Every structure is written in C-alpha cells, then in structure tokens.
Image (cartoon, rainbow, N blue to C red):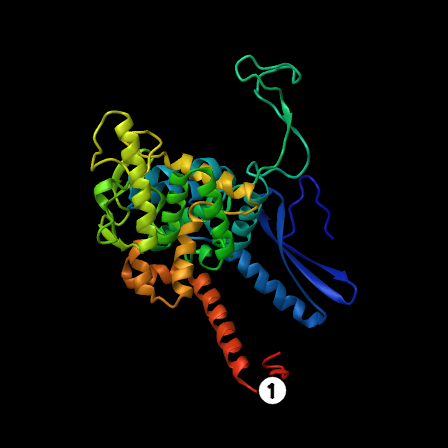
Amino acid sequence: MVAKTRGRRRERSYLRRRGNSFQVLVYSGVYPLTGKDSYLTDSTKNERQVEKIQTRLLAQVDQQRQATTKATPAYVLDSWLEVHEAEPTTLAGYRRAAEIRIKPALSRVPIAKLTPRVLEQFYAELRRCRNRCDGWPYVEHRTSEPHDCDEDDRTTRRRCQPHQCRPYAAATIREAHVIISGALSTAVRWGRLQSNPTEVTKKPKQPKPPTPKQAAQQVEAAMAQDESWGALVWLYMVTGARRGEVLALRRHDVHLDTGMLEIRRNIVDGIEKDTKTHQIRRIALDEGTCDLLRAHRKRYEKQVCGLDEEPRDDAFVFSYQADHRRPCDPDGVSHRYKTMCTSLGIDSHLHALRHYSATEHITACVDVRTVAGPLGHGGGGTTTLRVYTAWVAESDKRAAEVLASSVASAVPSDLVRTPLFS
C-alpha cells in the first residue's frame, strides 16, 4: 500500500493482493459525513481484469468530480424553499428542520456527492443520536464559557451532564428525507443535477399503525382517564381525520341527526385556517359514534349551565375550557396520547391513528376511492395508494389467509394434511 507522506502527491489508485484476489482501490475524495478519505473498491481473482476495473472506477470518480455544478445542499435547500408552494406554517417547519438537522451535516459538500450511501448513513445517524455523536462518551457543557462543571448554573439550575444519545423520532427523519428529496428534485429540473439520489435511497421506515387489539386497549385506557378524552381518541380512529381538523370542529359541524361530520377547518400552530386541501369534506358516522358524541354534547351543555351561560353552536367540540371557547392545543393532545400509549407499552403516536383508520377500511375491502374521501386525499385515491402501499399489501396477505382458511375448512380432512393446507 502506498504510504501517505507530507508533501507527496496522493496516488489516485493502487493495487493490493489479498489472498488469491486482487483488490483495486481508487481515491474518491473525503467522505462527507466523517471527513475521512473514501475509496471505491472492487476485487477480482483474474489479474487480466485488474486494468478494466481500474479504468471503470477512475471513470466513476471523474464523473463525480466533473459535475455540472458545485452547488451545496444548503444553497439548493434555500433555493427550493423560496419557490416551493406550501402553507406558511409548513414552510416554516421545513426551514427549521433544514437549519437544525440537515445543513449542519450536509452543507459542506457538492450535491453531486450526495449518494444514496451518504443519505442512508445520515438517516442512520439521526436514528442513533440527534447530536450525531461518534459513540464515545463526553460531557454536555451548559456553556462555552470557562466554568466549573460541578457548580449549578444560576439561570438554568443544572450541572453539566454526561451525554446521553437521544434519537430522533421516525416522523422527524422522514420529514428530513422529504425535504432533501424535494430540494434535489428541483435541482434536477433546473439542470444542476443529473439524477436525484433519493429516488433509489432506502427511505426511513414508516411506523406501523396499531393493531385492532392495541386500538381497543387505547380506547379503554382513554375512557378510563376521561370520557371526553376517550371520545376524542375514538373520533380520531373512526374518521382518520388530521389532528388539527378534529380539534377545529365546532358544534354546528357535527350533525348527529343525520350522522354526518363536516371537516371545514384546520388548526396549525394555534391558528385556525382552511383544511390542507382547501376543501370541505363530509364524513359519515355510525350510530355508536353518534351516541358517543351525544353524550359528549350533554356534558358540554351541563358545564355551560353551571356557568349560567347558554350553549353556543360555534363552541368547539373538544376543549379543556368549560365554555369550549378555545380548542385543545394540538401539541398537548399529541403528548397526552403518546404518554398514554407508553404507559400501555405500545409504541405509537397520534398520526398513526390516521394510518389505522385507512388500514382497517382497506382490510375490510372498502375501495380506495371511498377510503380517500374521509382522509382528505385527492387524485381519486392515488395519494392513498402511494402513502398506504404497505398497508394494502398487509391487507392482501390477511385476505389470502382468510381465503386459505376458508378453503381448508371445506376440503376432506386427509387433504388438509398436505403442505398447501398444513
């Protein structure tokens, strides 16, 4: 192996013998995430193939170095956010995620070197630790100024503590992937990149929705805590509506006489606004859900009478205030749901109930177009299929098992022992 010496020019490629094989190594630059030297390698037992392998690897490196642009991900992200069409709150969240999570890790390398390997390792680091530490123990100092780690800080009243790895949630990592994918797609359209590496990058896993058994446990636990809280959790399950859409419901949006729910508004960051698709949609309610909401309405009317006030049609359906003049805080609802699931030993979050609703409808053989309606997906169900492809496959598997069991019960007992029915 060629030694690295100061003042000596680095060899672009070299060959080394490993047992009966020949290994070709070609220097491809500094690896973006670690700052260490990176090499493209390939091996062969045929010495005649060495030159061909070397030529191919050198061509790959040259193609990376001769990219049409030296734009960095930070520049591409900022450019994309300037033209991306989305709600102001969504754009604010994307900018915050880019500044906190994406730019510190990927901003110093050309976008041409953002390979699927780099992105997948970046996602793995976020799953391991939000500080992207190297795994070695260290102390998290409360300030960059000289100080005594054992003394309490007068403002924060906390001592410097040993670092503990805290991974990002799966939803946070998926958000980073969405942002990177959107920015690089724009770079391709603008001719600054030949292809988008996120198209072949292994996407962060999407959490599974709760099983029917887990959903029953959640409803039971919610009802035990508070009947109003139980009604809220139940409504999320049966409608599949977004978090802010349910919290934005007012009394006049719930038509219990006809069993119909109107989704007209959404609450994001404490602001009441239109729905994500800027459309009103209507969701049919079963009789059991209507009875649950009738009982919830009676509780509200009793609370208002205790305040010597009259019930208002524009009162919010779900509120922590007795007069229901203000809706529940969305983040507070998510936190309460997460805490409840943790106490039950269930790994879930509030948005998973939206997946649960879609999964159960699809499993029940409801057509995708009908499922897309309550969810608020456009395109006649194309978005539903794209988002819930995994759940469609799961429901197909369950349907196949039901069919096989049905056939097996109808055939003679001696045939059931065959591999097909065993």
Quadrant of the rendered structure where residue 305 is?
top left
Q: Is residue 108 visible?
A: no
Q: Can you give x and y, in whole percent of width and height, for residue 94 in the image? A: 38, 41
Q: Amino acid at mark 1?
A: Leu
**Along the line of sight, which residue is nearer the eye, 218 or 190?**
218
Q: Residue 166 location, x and y as percent? A: 58, 37
Task: Give the quarter of the figure containing the C terminus.
Answer: bottom right
**Residue 385 location, quadrant:** bottom left
Q: Which residue is mark 1?
A: 415
> Toward the viewer: 57 or 224?
224
Q: Residue furthest top?
A: 154
Left or right: residue 299 versus residue 103 is left
Residue 351 placement, left or right of 10: left
Judge whether 139 appears above or below 78 on screen. above
* Crowding at mark 1 (Cα within 10 Å: few <14, some 14-19, many 20+): few
Which residue corresponds to the image point at 42% horizontal and 49% vertical from the top-left? 178
Seen in the picture, residue 408 relative to 338 is either above or below; the reply is: below
